[in-house]
Image (cartoon, helix red, strand yellow):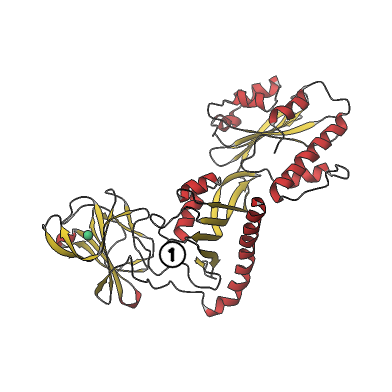
Amino acid sequence: MSLNKEEILAQNHSAQPPRLGLVWPILFAVLFFFSVVAAFGISHDTTAEGLEVHRVVEELQLPSHSAQEVVETEASETHKFWREERIQRGDIVSTILVRLGVDDPEATSYLSQARGVRSLYQLRPGRSVRAVTTSEGRLEQLTYLNTNGKRLLVERTPEGFRATEKIPDVEARISQSSGEIATSLFGATDAAGLHENIAIQLADIFSSDIDFNRDLRTGDRFAVVYEANYAHGEFVGVGRVVTAEFTNRGKTYRAVYFENKKGRGGYYTPDGKNVRKAFLRSPLAFSRITSRYTNSRFHPILRKWVAHRGIDYGARTGTPVRATADGWVKFAGRKGSYGKLVTLRHANGYSTRYAHLSRFAKSTRRGKRVSQGQVIGYVGRTGRATGPHLHYEFLANGVHRNPATLALPPGPPITPDLRDEFQSVAAVKLKRLDLLGDTNLALLD
Ligand SMILES: [Zn+2]
């Protein structure tokens, strides 16, 4: 948006323009059209005639990273203005009131003394305070989504100010983003203004196909459609990734979230295959391999050539270790050079071992069920280990295999009874991803 706050406020505070009643609707219309253009990239015939200001105010979605907004709420003679101010580091209530254009001793006194407004004093940078004022700066209404997650509402009533706090209605809006990798996934998502949690989800969704520690290349691309939670128009956090696409070294992977009737959800390819393998590639979320699977290596403690039929991941003591697949605990205890060891049994004759742990997770006991991704223990250096690391073994029918190179079996696909439902849900979700791709092309023009 090209209208900056100073210009807008200058309009407001300077000598009254001669035809105020006309200026504000036009200014508002300009703001509105800029929003539309910014959002959809459609060119418009910018005539202000026939614009219903009231309706537009309600429909205007305040962008989550918006600068300050000044929007007129009434086109009547007593002008009221909606203003929104982002809280900055070091702000106190009085400085925000000044920026909101509040020039109202009664309001200032109330806001500094009333018990009901104390949560206003815990200002969280990045959040917003909104106010409705008259053109003379008289406060009519003030709202703030406070640090307790409640919405504080201060209103002027005929009997004076009144403050109430309510749990806000949180609404999930579908948001989208896309970007290209220059150095790292987090660098790219950061540059796209994407919440860190979405980057983590992205890495997680595609972790069976892409090793985000090693496989990323400059020019890799992502597009993601996700839920963003809003309380009364204000962004309060992100939800789940709905559908996503990742192009790694020229190969494109797509995933759609789908929930079965029992509410158990997962990510699937457009043709209904499970995106995840039955096994995670690595038992640690972020890790570096310090020793690979080999049939012979020089052992640093034994000082001789031995086979290393597992993978070592360097990580700090206490790093959570995840079960790489659904299964049962077959063993959890000390075992010679393995130190503290967990052995899991999985379907179809597979088993996995996690060694040198510092401790076990509470529920890791013989016979207990574990699900993929569940934390079963923590990295340590028990047994024969030179330093803290996880030693991970993968066995198929009792034979050691290299999990880094083995074609891992896929997770369960969409079952035949859900196929039709999945196809129709996926079609809608993938359409959004297609549109997102098209938008990118338009931007490049
Ligand atoms: Zn090892």
Kindly identify which residue carries mark 1.
209
Q: Disc 1, ligand 1: is the CB inside 8 Å?
A: no
Asked whether 67 or 364 is in front, the reply is 67
Residue 188's x, y, as percent?
50, 48
Specify few, some or many for label 1: CA neighbours under 10 Å numbering under 14, 14-19, or 20 or more. some
Q: Is residue 335 left or right of residue 170?
A: left
Q: Is residue 174 left or right of residue 182?
A: right
Residue 413's x, y, as percent?
48, 74
Secondary structure state at the residue bearing disc 1: loop
| Residue furthest to the bottom | 416
Ligand 1: give its quadrant.
bottom left
Residue 192's x, y, as percent?
56, 47
| Residue furthest to the front | 445
Q: Is residue 42 left or right of residue 202?
A: right
Q: Is residue 274 left or right of residue 13?
A: left
Asked whether 185 or 324 is in front, the reply is 185
Q: Does residue 331 lie above or below 130 as drawn?
A: below
The amino acid on which the numbered mark 1 sits, given as a three-letter code, is Asp
User: Residue 211, located in which quarter of the rendered image?
Assistant: bottom left
Give the tally of numbered discs: 1
Residue 345's x, y, as percent?
30, 71
- For the question of whether residue 16 can be seen, the reply is yes
| Residue furthest to the left | 303
Screen quadrant of the N terminus? top right
User: At 16% across and 59% down in the image, what residue appears?
Assistant: 298
Q: Does residue 36 lie above or below 270 as drawn?
A: above
User: At 57% across and 25% down in the image, what residue appears?
Assistant: 92
- For the question of whether residue 60 can be seen, the reply is no
Q: Does residue 421 lie above or below 114 as drawn?
A: below
